[in-house]
Image: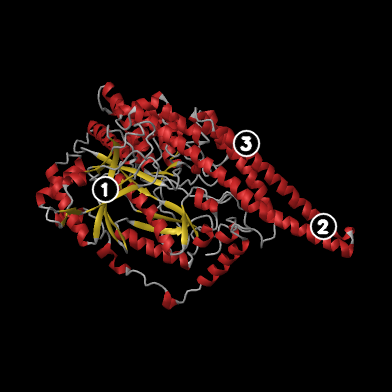
Amino acid sequence: MTASTRHEAVRGLAHEAVIEPETMKEEPNNARIPEYFGKFVFNDKTQQERLPGPVYKALRQVIETGAPLTHEIADSVASAMKDWAIENGATHYTHWFQPMTGSTAEKHDSFMNPTKSGGAVLELSGAQLFQGEPDASSFPSGGLRATFEARGYTAWDPTSPAFLRCTPEGSTLTIPTAFCSWTGAALDKKTPLLRSNQALSKAAARILQLIGETQVTRASSSGGIEQEYFLIDADFFNLRPDLLACGRTLFGARPYKGQEFDDHYFGNIPTRVLRFMHDLEHELWLLGVPVKTRHNEVAPSQYELAPVYQPISISTDQNMLTMALLKDVAERHGFACLMHEKPFAGLNGSGKHLNWSVADNLNNNLFDPGKTPHENLKFIIFLTAIARGVDLHQDILRSSIASASNDHRLGANEAPPAIISVFLGKHLEGIVDSIIAGSTPDAGSTEPLRLGVTNLPDLPRDISDRNRTSPLAFTGNRFEFRAVGSNQSPAYPATFLNTILADSLDFLSDAIEKAGGPSTENIQKIVRETLTRHRRIFFSGDNYSQEWREEAARRGLLELKGTPEALAPLRDPKNEELFSKMGVFTAEELESRWYVQTEIYVNKINVEAMATRDLAMTMLLPAAMEHQKRLADSIHALERVVGSEGTTSQKEILGLVTKAIGSLKSSVDSLLQFQERWELATDDLGAQATGYRNEVLPAMDKVRGSADLLERLVDDSLWPLPKYREMLFIR
């Protein structure tokens, strides 16, 4: 790769960006959205049309109440699903699951089965729908099975509908599934999520019935998952080995203009990007993903899409599907989609805000405070449970969002800090404080927000403001977990939120029963005591500030800054007891999560360290040394004409370049020493991870510092890597 290659990419992109209207792809007819929305999903509507009435009703019972799935139902569903898929061009089916790697996995099987006569039939049995058997030996298990124990099972998740992945080469029936070992241990992120939703349903129904809501029999969580991402031209992406291997830039000097003007957020969407978004949304709508919002994010070339709420199993699956389609559609439009939490240093990173709520079987949102939240018993109880759950389990909530990539984002004055807290807003905090004090709360203003312009309408006033700095913020009728990383599966943090809420609801139910029943006096006393004990978790100020870090420390809140520290609570006996009691993880399954995530952390940093050394030595140093040689030759030639006194400035520049080259080489040597030291420390995985965090990462930063200085000194025609100013601003 040479600098001329980089310049050719810039020139080529500038030429290709000029597209005549007649060559533009015709956009989908949005007026027909209601006709084609969910066309490629075996959803409730399609099930009702294609299944016999009794089978359809039985399947709804399975989905809604957790009734057992019989072989007769499975056979009937499989037959209808197969016919529907074949009619839409499918030739294969696959069980689609989420292993502990954080991505999705699939193995395709044909519908074709040979007959004894030498022909073939197309079949999908209930047994094949219900259960698949992929090789589990190549997936991480964290010790849940030995390497030689290859058998694994996928089990159909009927709560998340099957769908078709369509390509010009054909379509595949994609069946969302859980993934477990042959012993039944969960090897995925879907199984614990389903278990946690069951635990939450049981706990929520119990306390609601206890306070008189006798018609409530179940509850479930829902999610609205916002997805942030970057788009850069594919030519630039392919010229950046660090992006190809690591998902983030290991080098790159700050551009002249970044995001300091705040002119990108909600700004005009570039035409080329808008075409990509239209195409993406069309595909998502065909697959029943209710994406509703699109806009520019804060950093240049950063964007966001957001769907409306879905049941948590569906919303997590749809988010993983969205991530796959983002990459596929971007490639068709000549883009690369970056979902690393921090692909560009010095710019805002990307999150995945999990908007989380809980509803009962009567469709009541249990996080909705109503017009008078202080008089809404259900809301106060659930708010109290959340306060207790988050305060007691700050550690594992932090564990749920821990990764090598998210570490670069959290606490970087653009994203929530590594300190877990809850934002309620002044009004709700005032109600909490009134409950604690035993006084009558201020009901808050119900007056509209007056804009002071006669021809504009008055707007309804929300009971609280929003706080973009909080990791877990109440936003009117839901909690927004803002600390989730853009590249992770939302199933994991959703599992942890469900679990801690279920545990605290059971705690409150136990306390009410022990006190003699759900009298007003008993409930008030229990709520007051619980909120008093856990009041410290609420914070409505600036989470970015140093003052908050100091205040959080005084309150005794945890600040687990890096992944090695953040994952350690997964091995804490109190957390093992919590997850085991709620039926979400066994102690062995929880330990396996620590092992797998820690190993992934070490491997990611090791790959980044190798890439840093390689790029520095084989691309950046040669470019810098060529520039150094040219400067020296120029000075030598100039001295023959004007004498040494006339080359003072040139020699100063040469000195700067020479010093930076020496610094770069020295920092690479130091990085190699640290990397070799900790690469061999395989007998203690926890210590190895800590070593990579405390020594290898800082050594990489020193290499980058020297290289980024050279980028500002070396002749632009020699620099081999596309620069930030090109990747972020040339579309």
The image quadrant that residue 312 belongs to is top left
Sequence-first tag of 1 and 2: 1
- Residue that carries the numbered disc 1 in the rendered image: 160
Q: Secondary structure at mark 3?
A: helix
Q: Nearer the viewer, residue 131 or 164?
A: 131
Give the residue type at disc 1.
Answer: Ser
Of labels 1 and 2, the one closer to you: 2
- The answer to whether residue 81 of the structure is visible from this angle is no
Asked whether 272 or 500 is in front, the reply is 272
- Measure the C-alpha gap from mark 2 to mark 3: 37 Å
Please name whichever residue, 301 or 176, is drawn nearer the observer in this view of the structure: 176
Q: Quadrant of residue 437?
A: top left
Identity, as a three-letter code, of the amino acid under mark 2? Ser
**In the image, which disc is placed on residue 649?**
2
- Most extreme residue toward the bottom, as rendered? 22
**Few, some or many residues within 10 Å of mark 2 (<14, 14–19, 20+):** few
> Marks 3/1: CA distance?
49 Å
Q: Nearer the viewer, mark 3 or mark 1?
A: 3
Is 619 situated left or right of 63 in this image? Answer: right
Please name the residue that numbered disc 3 is placed on.
Answer: 673
Distance between the alpha carbons at the discs numbered 1 and 2 = 68 Å
**Quick check: 7 above or below 724?**
below
SS at badge 1: loop
Locate the N terminus and report the quarter of the image it occupies: bottom right
Task: Identify the mark nearer the N-term, 2 or 3.
Answer: 2
- Please give left or right for residue 76 compared with residue 288 in the image: left
Please state the horizontal and vertical placement of residue 168, each as a whole percent of the image.
Answer: 32, 64
Query: Is disc 2 in contact with disc 3, using a CB cutoff of under 8 Å?
Result: no
Q: Is residue 54 visible?
A: yes
Tell me if residue 637 comes above or below residue 405 in the rendering: below
Residue at 60% x, 55% y is: 260
Residue at x-position 88% and y-position 58%? 644
